[in-house]
Image (cartoon, helix red, strand yellow):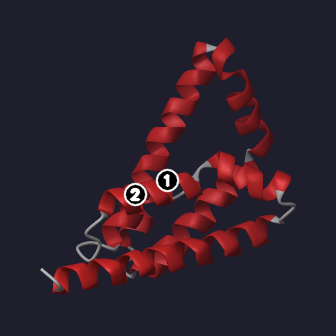
Amino acid sequence: MPDLDLLGATADPAERLRLAVRQTYAFYESLFGQIWGTYKLQDESPVLASTLTQLGEFQAEIVDLVVAAWMPVLLRSGEARGLVIGLLNFLTYRALRHDGGLSPEQATDRMTEALLHSLEALSRQSRKEAANV
């Protein structure tokens, strides 16, 4: 289970992101079958639907901590948040593992690189836009 206190206490934005991906993906891997089963059966069970809602709320807390570390540089925090929430989602992890054939370590490392690259690019773009104002 990702440690929100540890994430919040990690000041460096890149390290906070690395930690968030590592902890989130390790959590998904530890409950891979159960989470996938919950997605598949959510329409048949209010309890499972509620479980996914709770998972989404917890994921949103992680995403908020990640994006907050990149502020105030990011002018487009909504875009950054949408990117992080989509790429940290269990279904993305499942696609990397199941469809992409990546190992847990490969999925974690490649996603960390992709998110770092994307957030750094958004930060550069925001600084450029702020300089032109």
Residue at mark 1: 85
Q: How far across and how far down the image is residue 25, in percent?
A: 66, 59
Tag 1, which secondary structure? helix
Tell which residue pokes out farthest to the front in this image: 132
Q: How far across and how far down the image is residue 50, in percent?
A: 53, 23
Say the numbered circle drawn on residue 81. 2
Q: Give the answer, above or below, for where 39 lies relative to 1.
A: above
Q: How far across and how far down the image is residue 106, in percent?
A: 77, 72
Query: Residue type at mark 2?
Result: Arg
The alpha-carbon separation of the residues under discs 2 and 1 comes to 6 Å
Q: Give the answer, above or below, for where 52 lies relative to 24.
A: above
Q: Is residue 77 left or right of residue 28?
A: left
Say the numbered circle drawn on residue 128. none
Q: Is residue 127 left or right of residue 4?
A: left
Characterize the local packing of mark 2: few (<14), some (14-19) or many (20 or more) Cα atoms within 10 angstroms.
Answer: some
Depth order, front residue of 41/133: 133
Image label count = 2
Depth order, front residue of 48/116: 116
Answer with the quarter of the image where residue 43 lies. Answer: top right
Q: Give the answer, above or below, for where 46 lies relative to 17.
A: above
Answer with the quarter of the image where residue 5 lies. Answer: bottom left
Name which residue lies at 34% across and 79% down: 125
Tell which residue pokes out farthest to the right in this image: 101
Tell which residue pokes out farthest to the left in this image: 133
Query: Residue type at mark 1?
Result: Ile
Discs 2, 1 touching: Cβ within 8 Å: yes
Name which residue lies at 58% across and 23% down: 49
Name which residue lies at 43% across and 81% down: 120
Q: Is residue 107 left or right of residue 73?
A: right
